[in-house]
Image: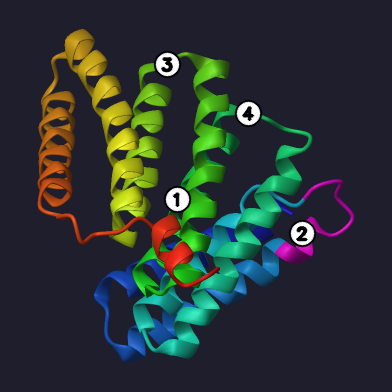
């Protein structure tokens, strides 16, 4: 088992190196390495109550490679591997609610949400929103569990992600919702900056203030002809 784990780790590192190099041939070789690592970890997971914690990592690595390859079919594969990663982490987390695993779960939800957000279209936006909301729930659990600064910053990221997806819709009522989440994010940033006074905390605060200002400008310029989604639905007789 130990030899298998070491081999899978070596394959994973080689795949990471090839991914960094870029180029079609390197990406194809990186995919081969990542799939071999996944096969080893899947085999070692057989007969265990839960999969190895490194198995979801393999799915994430393969997702990253498919995404870098680009093209509709590869993007579809990237999304599917991310979905599988989340299912595996959730399965492990039923028995193990460790801080490490919860962080991995929230990151996985955020990554999948980001992928859907980049694809555009109302269906993908809804999927992005759903994943960001799931990530936010995990972040709240993390904060309650640990009470650490890192968990509090994760909550800031959660509020920002939710605000970002609402802002993406671009309707007046969704912009108002985005402003609510950005405001919550700013409150956390102000608290963190007051306590920490680090470059990161200052940068986070400046960033979210800029986002709020830009969002408010969009709302101010929306004009009387901008209708809410509910108003549009009423006009269309929905």
Of tags 1 and 4, the one toward the viewer is: 1
Q: Check if residue 232 falls in the magenta segment.
A: no
Which residue is labeled 2 in the image?
44
First of labels 2, 3 by sequence position: 2
Q: Pick the residue in front: 149 or 12.
A: 149
Q: Are marks 1 and 4 in contact (CB under 8 Å)?
A: no
- Identify the secondary structure beneath mark 4: loop
Considering every residue shown, the one lying at the far top of the view is 195
Q: CA distance from mark 4 to mark 2?
A: 22 Å
Looking at the picture, how far across and down is residue 58, in whole percent?
Answer: 57, 63
Q: Residue at label 1?
A: 110
The earlier-in-sequence mark between 3 and 4 is 4
Name the residue rendered at 34%, 75% in the picture: 18
- Nearer the observer: mark 2 or 3; the answer is 3
Name the residue: 68% across, 71% down. Answer: 39
Q: Quadrant of the C terminus?
A: bottom right
Q: Which residue is mark 4?
A: 98
Q: Is residue 83 left or right of residue 14?
A: right
Residue 159, picture quadrant: top left
Answer with mark 1 or mark 4, whichever residue precedes in sequence: 4
The mark found on residue 148 in the picture is 3
CA neighbours of label 4 inside 10 A, class few (<14), some (14 to 19), many (20+):
few
Discs 2, 3 touching: Cβ within 8 Å: no
Please name whichever residue, 197 or 1, is drawn nearer the observer in this view of the structure: 197
Q: Position of residue 136 (x, y in %)?
A: 49, 37
From which residue to which does the magenta span run?
Answer: 42-50
């Amino acid at each position: 088992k130990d030899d298998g784990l070491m081999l899978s780790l070596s394959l994973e590192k080689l795949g990471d190196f090839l991914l960094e190099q870029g180029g079609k041939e390197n990406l194809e070789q990186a995919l081969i390495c990542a799939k071999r690592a996944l096969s080893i970890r899947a085999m070692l997971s057989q007969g265990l109550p839960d999969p190895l914690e490194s198995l979801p990592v393999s799915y994430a690595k393969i997702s990253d490679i498919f995404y870098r390859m680009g093209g509709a079919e590869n993007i579809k594969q990237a999304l599917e591997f991310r979905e599988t990663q989340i299912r595996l982490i959730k399965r492990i987390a039923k028995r193990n609610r460790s801080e490490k695993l919860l962080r991995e779960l929230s990151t996985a939800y955020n990554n999948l949400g980001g992928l859907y957000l980049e694809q555009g279209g109302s269906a993908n936006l809804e999927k992005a929103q759903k994943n960001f909301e799931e990530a936010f729930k995990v972040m709240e659990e993390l904060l309650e569990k640990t009470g650490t600064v890192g968990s509090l910053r994760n909550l800031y990221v959660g509020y920002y992600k939710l605000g970002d997806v609402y802002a993406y819709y671009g309707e007046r009522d969704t912009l108002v919702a985005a402003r609510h989440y950005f405001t919550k994010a700013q409150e956390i940033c102000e608290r963190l900056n007051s306590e920490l006074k680090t470059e990161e905390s200052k940068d986070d605060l400046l960033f979210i203030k800029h986002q709020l200002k830009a969002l408010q400008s969009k709302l101010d310029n929306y004009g009387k002809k901008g209708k809410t989604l509910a108003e549009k639905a009423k006009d269309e007789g929905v």
